[in-house]
Amino acid sequence: MASKIGFIGVAAAALALSACQNQDGGNSANGGARDQIRAVGSSTVYPFTTVVAEQFARKNPGFKAPIVESTGTGAGMKLFCAGVGAQHPDIENASRRIKKSELDDCVKNGVKDIVEVQIGIDGIVLAESKTGPQFKLTEADIYKAVAAEPYGKPNTAKTWKDVNPALPATRIVVYGPPPTSGTRDAFAELILDKGCNADPATAALKKTDEDKHKAICTKVREDGAYVESGENDNLIVQKLVANPDAVGIFGYSFLEENVDKVRGVAIQNVVPTYDTIASYEYPGARPLYIYVKSAHLNAIKGLKEFVQEYAGAWNKGGYLSRRGLIAAPDDVRAANLTIAQKLTPLDPATIK
Amino acid sequence: MNSRIPNPVAQLDMPGAAESAVRRPTDWKSGAMQSRVRRRYAAERRFRFLGLTAVLLSVAFLTFLLVTMIGNGIRGFTRTEIRLPIDFPASTLILDPAALRGPEADRALAGADLEGVAAAAADTAFGQGGNRLLSDGAWIAVRQAIKADPSILGRKADIWVPASTGIDLAAKSEAAAADEAAHARLEQAGAVRTGLNLGFLTAADSTDPTLVGIWGALKGSLLTMVVTLLLAFPIGVLSALYLEEYAPRNRWTDLIEVSINNLAAVPSIIFGLLGLAVFLNFMHLPRSAPVVGGLTLALMTMPVIVIAGRNAIKSVPPSIRDAALGIGASRVQVVFHHVLPLALPGILTGTIIGMARALGETAPLLMIGMRAFISSPPSGLTEPATVLPVQIFLWSDEVNRGFVEKTSAAIVVLLLFLLAMNGLAIYLRNKFETRW
């Protein structure tokens, strides 16, 4: 009996010891200020923030390298808005503007002031293999080809010719991101929604039944014509090379990196290039943002300098543009440079 | 075989055997018997053939995996370098060689525009746009060269710097036409070489494939595994010992057994959610830290060790316990002097399986933030870190094409780590193994 109790004692002591050790570890990391910057958020902004983080660490040996985590914009916002303090991130990478509900959540948790900086523009491009049929599509064509219920009727289109008689009679195969991806949200918002509203009756539906309008406009078909290819855009490029009749959807940086394999598909007769995206002429263009907590600016070492480094890198010809970021128009850039220098907080009234 | 000992086969052979008291000897030469024997041999051969096919199939899969991974990955361990002639006295660089010998060397170098100097040198050496042939981190090689030998600041020097991804790809496989042409020109001038990439084994993550290293992720994996082993092994072994040697057999112990078996089968992502809720949100441990990863994976590994441990302890013959008790050993002495050493090989096997699973796990670690971009190797258990499988996952998703071979190289490193870990465990197992 005594041995039994002894045994339990040993086990309990081992448990207590390990728990104790961990708590110590936790305290040392959480108690004081964190000595490196933490960023979370969009996988689209991730490659840009990591480059800036790397350059920042190289140029400033006094600061530790920032930690950048790719969680997706929505999940990142949750982490970012969870509160003020060393255990919460300082920067949120966002591939869209912050939503009213997220801002409310922030304020509720004590994150009162945040700085919004637009870092540049990203393009969501449709692309095909270099040996492909040189598609020329309109937003309505794309919508009719991939929507689950174009204009409220089940989608029966098998080939591009069914969608638009001017197009070739090749089977519709579109490789694109899954619903969890920010790229997919942007694709639905920037391209499908516009194609959908090309029909006046459906456009009118938005006023009467918004939920139904959203379902009709953004739901993508699930009968095999639209192939969800995961978050891995390299995979989509490989698939396009293997299947020249297919169309892929991904970020502009992947198109730029693989120009020897794939080419952009013209939408409304606009070919995706650096210039057409920068001027928002190409329909797939969207702005990218970072959000910075004002309360952390003084508490976290190097945070101000990091924002400056970002602002210095987003110009035309800067190292971010070599990674595929498209510089915003001059006036937008100038305005955001001022924000980055003065660190002016975002005016909540501008968020819908 | 012609003995008179009744055997079932012989009896089946003779339908009339029940009536006749004296059994006739089996006629092995008869046609029916011959074909029966043939069938038996055929079944034997068939079974051996199927078994061999199964083994060969798995060997083929493994070989295919290893050959493709090593074939792609071996290039990830090399890098292409370009000879960059820099005329330091003529450059815009103003550095006092004396300052570089002192402790302030890093600060002095940080203030110098080495990036600009390297770019300018590349433009003069390889013509306009020569800078694009170099890696973004080429100036780091220049910095190291100056630090190693400050006297080169007074003369012209040739420094080997990493080439851009395009040139690297052109040197190893195929790349865009422009890069191929540039590489051919460099090769003609003898200004390019491909060699072992030591940086890959010593650096951490980077956004530039010519500068990335696996050491950060490898160290993260090591630290995480150490925490996992330190927690899961003792707790698992103690639970197994208690349940087998001490616990009374009743409804409660049955319930515990069922729970542990269930726990071992729970999908790993659930443990990630548990880790997020308990260690991060409740205990406020630091995000992305190896200690949290280790704790989470320990929860996952422990049931495997308990189950394997219980089976190993069960297979220790009761006679050994009885003998030890018989000569007056206490229960604890029986357990620690006899049962545990004999069961240890089996427990270690279970531990290997559990740890190997933990090493390859990504899902639970994504939940607790170990998928971050971290450009310096972790220096402690609470420092942000990532692990090998997550690093592979992150690289596979990178835009730059230079990351393809780095991903394969990282897989090779992961396989080697696994091999080393299993090798160690097998060595320990053989060392402790007792045969009787």
Image: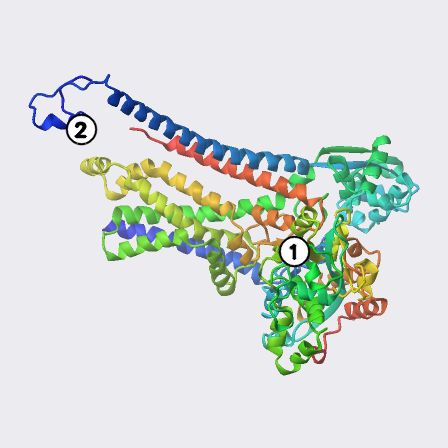
Q: In this view, does B426 lie to the left or right of A222?
A: left
Q: Residue A173 carries which label?
A: 1
Near-viewer residue (A168 or A193): A168
Asked which secondary structure carries label 2, the reply is helix
> Where, quadrant-wise, is the N terminus of chain B in this rendering?
top left
Residue at image location 89% in from the left, 39% down from the top: B125
Quadrant of the rendered structure where residue A34 is? bottom right
Query: Is residue B148 visible from the viewing direction of this image?
Result: no
Residue at image location 40% in from the left, 51% down from the top: B264
On what subunit does the disc labeled 1 rest? A
Near-viewer residue (B267 or B334): B267
Asked which secondary structure carries label 1, the reply is loop
Circle 1 residues within 10 Å: few <14, some 14–19, many ≥20: many
On what subunit does the disc labeled 2 rest? B
Q: Where is residue B394 in the image (x, y as percent from the top left)?
A: 63, 51
Query: Is residue A274 visible from the viewing direction of this image?
Result: yes
> Where, quadrant-wise, is the C terminus of chain B in this rendering?
top left
Circle 2 residues within 10 Å: few <14, some 14–19, many ≥20: few
Image vertical order of residue A275 relative to residue B412, above or below: below
Q: Which amino acid does label 2 sit on?
A: Leu
Image vertical order of residue B259 relative to residue B148, above or below: below
Question: Farthest residue toward the right?
Answer: B90
Residue at the spot of label 2 = B12
Q: Residue A106 carries which label?
A: none
Q: What residue type is labelled 1?
A: Val
User: Dots 2 and 1: beta carbons under 8 Å?
Assistant: no
Quadrant of the rendered structure where residue A320 is? bottom right
